[in-house]
Image (cartoon, rainbow, N blue to C red):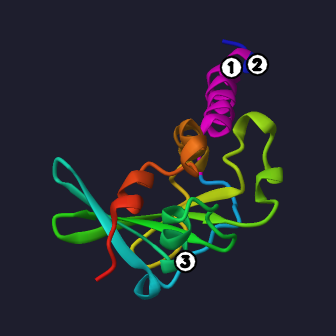
Amino acid sequence: MTRARSRLPILAAMACGVVMVGWQVDAEPTKATMPDIGKLVHYTTVTRGEVTEHIMTTREAIEAVKAGKPVPNGTHFALIDYREGKVFRYFIMEKGAGWGEDYDKNRRTGDWQFQWFKPDGTINAAENTARCQSCHSSRADREFLYTFNDIRRFEFE
């Protein structure tokens, strides 16, 4: 076997590794930040099999939705994903003035940006926020929220 042919499998493996790294889908940096969960209002819970999701936002956001007004800039929505009774991860939506301009027109969800966080509050780089935008884009008529009607029905205690 010639020296060039003996390197072929190594070069092929390296090329595959480069291509696979290019296909890896990691979290992209966004402007969404981890809110102070203790300051948010828990307005609904969703259960999916063994997963329980507590969904929270600000009092101002709830009042805006109930009044038929846009959710204010600076608002956080937090989905807290519990598994086996423990926080598994946080899914955060945050709205900021002009934030939609960070994305091409086909990927925009108004001025909302998304981020996944680990239980310790650090960004979970293994999650893909483009997937979040893709799903939430179908809710443009409801502030990009799946729980829009839950908010409208929510009563403060």
The answer to whether residue 46 is left or right of residue 2 is left
Give the Cα separation between the discs numbered 1 and 2.
Answer: 7 Å
The residue depicted at 41 percent of the width and 87 percent of the height is 38
Q: Amino acid at mark 3?
A: Glu
Q: Amino acid at mark 2?
A: Ala
For disc 1, the marked residue is 8
Q: Amino acid at mark 1?
A: Leu
| Magenta span includes 12 | yes
Residue 25 in sight in this render: no
Relative height, residue 26 to residue 18 (above, below) = below
Name the quarter where the N terminus is drawn.
Answer: top right
For disc 3, the marked residue is 60
Q: Earlier in the sequence, mark 2 or mark 3?
A: 2
Dot 2: element = helix
Front-lying residue, 83 or 54: 54
The residue depicted at 52 percent of the width and 62 percent of the height is 65
